[in-house]
Image (cartoon, rainbow, N blue to C red):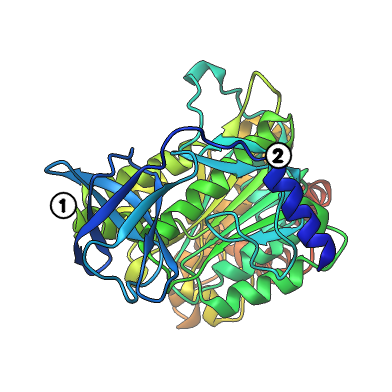
Amino acid sequence: MIGELQLDLARMRAAPVASGPVLTGRVVTCDGGLIEVAGLPLPVGSLGAIENDAGAECLAEVIGFRAGHSLMMLLGDAMLLHPQARVRALGNPGEVRVGPALLGRAVDALGDPIDGGPRLDLKQAWPLAGRREGALERASVHVPFDCGVRAINALATMGVGQRLGIMAGSGVGKSVLVDTIAGHAVADVIVVALIGERAREVSDFVSRHMAGHRRGGIVVVAVPADHAPNLRLRAAQYASAIGEYFRAQGKRVLLILDSLTRVAHAARELALVLGEPGAARGYPPSALAAVTRIVERAGNSARTGGAVTGIYTVLADGDDSNDPVVDTARAILDGHIVLSRALAQRGHYPAIDVPASLSRVMDDLVPPNVAAAAQRLRALIAAREDNRDLVLMGAYRAGSDALLDEALALSGVIDAFLTQTRGAAEPLAASHQALLRLMAPGDA
């Protein structure tokens, strides 16, 4: 305790003291979580502290303007607020604190620890919305990325700096797959953003990944589902900012965002509160644009040599692959992994629908023989799945289709290749060797 107090005193001594007046305003109206404040002209994205009747302060964020008043949304619940409550400006607008002290820690969207550890001493500032780079400053993807999952490594090989989506309905295994990748992927720093998830899942994830030898290279940013929409959106932006900071240091970063759909839901809530009309199935244009902005922040940096490899889970509402968020993500990402509910119900893990999944950069990352073997295995899997009902009914006669005959002959070894024990890892090189052995001409 004394040590923490000494650290706090040292931070206070080092903190710059503003010589000018403190900006303050007054609450004019409060409609749910939306608060109208007079006399406090702050930029969008700024934070403010609002006094309440309990003598405490509620945090709020500026999300817009109306008739000369600032529109703020609470980052918590509207408890004991009263008319004309005083509002004061906090911090530097549009900036968040980052630094190496985040490694091995779990924080919320404001950078405050949620793991029970001491307060963080973060000296560097970084724009919450990121530092936009020119298109030619992004280096191409040319180095393979080892995610630890055999089916992905072999049939949809990822690259360092790629943006990949994991798309599925609820309860199909996205979180388990993400957990495996977070535990075994090869990267200098792993940043995991758990947005809109159940608090239990956040607790379980932190307890699993913050205890082993990899703890010093992982950062968790978590905001559960019961928090305010602007806080959930801010968590995604903060996690991206952390990844950009380490990329600027020349590090290879893996950014896992679970889930991109919850980010779109949060952006939709904010847009509807501000009066923006819903367009595609209730999603205002700005909500889908928020998805694009988040995804585009990942990638390689030609200037520093660092990279942010992005893995984004996308929840297909009602298993609808044409959901606006799924469609937007699929268009902007460099590849996607589709999880099948039918495979999950058969106990097939990971439940990857191989014919529907692809990596758009794989052909530039693997030797021609690996690419050819992957293409052949994809054709066999597609033939088997397309004719599965026909075979199960006994209506198929052997010899009618040479490709299907080969797929049925290799069915057992194909399933053994595609499945993997939960929590186990398969390195990239071993995955490619296993693929070449499976597709060797002598096995046909």
Numbered disc 1: secondary structure:
loop
Residue 397 position, x and y percent, is 50, 72
Give the residue type that dot 2 points to.
Ala
Q: Residues within 10 Å of mark 1 (few under 14, many from 20)?
A: few
Q: Please report the residue visible at 74 percent of the width from the left and 35 percent of the height from the top.
A: 251
Query: Is 270 left or right of 401, judged from the image as shown?
Result: left
Measuring 83% from the left and 65% from the top, which residue is drawn there?
2
Tell me the quadrant of the picture where the N terminus can be found.
bottom right
**Residue farthest to the right, as pictured:** 213
Compare residues 269 and 259 and report the one nearer the observer: 269
Residue kind at label 1, given as amino acid type: Ala
Image coords of residue 359 (percent x, y) = 56, 43
Give 256 or 42, whichever is nearer the viewer: 42
The local crowd at label 2, few if under 14, some if 14 to 19, many if 20 or more residues have their Cα within 10 Å, is few
Can residue 291 be seen here? The reply is yes
Q: Is residue 97 above or below residue 75?
A: above
Q: From the viewer's perspective, is the residue at label 1 or at label 2 nearer? A: 2
- Locate residue 91 relative to residue 278 in the image: left or right: right
Q: Residue at x 70, y 39 (%)?
A: 14
Residue closer to the observer: 27 or 43: 27
Q: Quadrant of the C terminus?
A: bottom right
Q: Which residue is mark 1?
A: 279
Residue 14, disc: 2
Which quadrant holds residue 438? bottom right
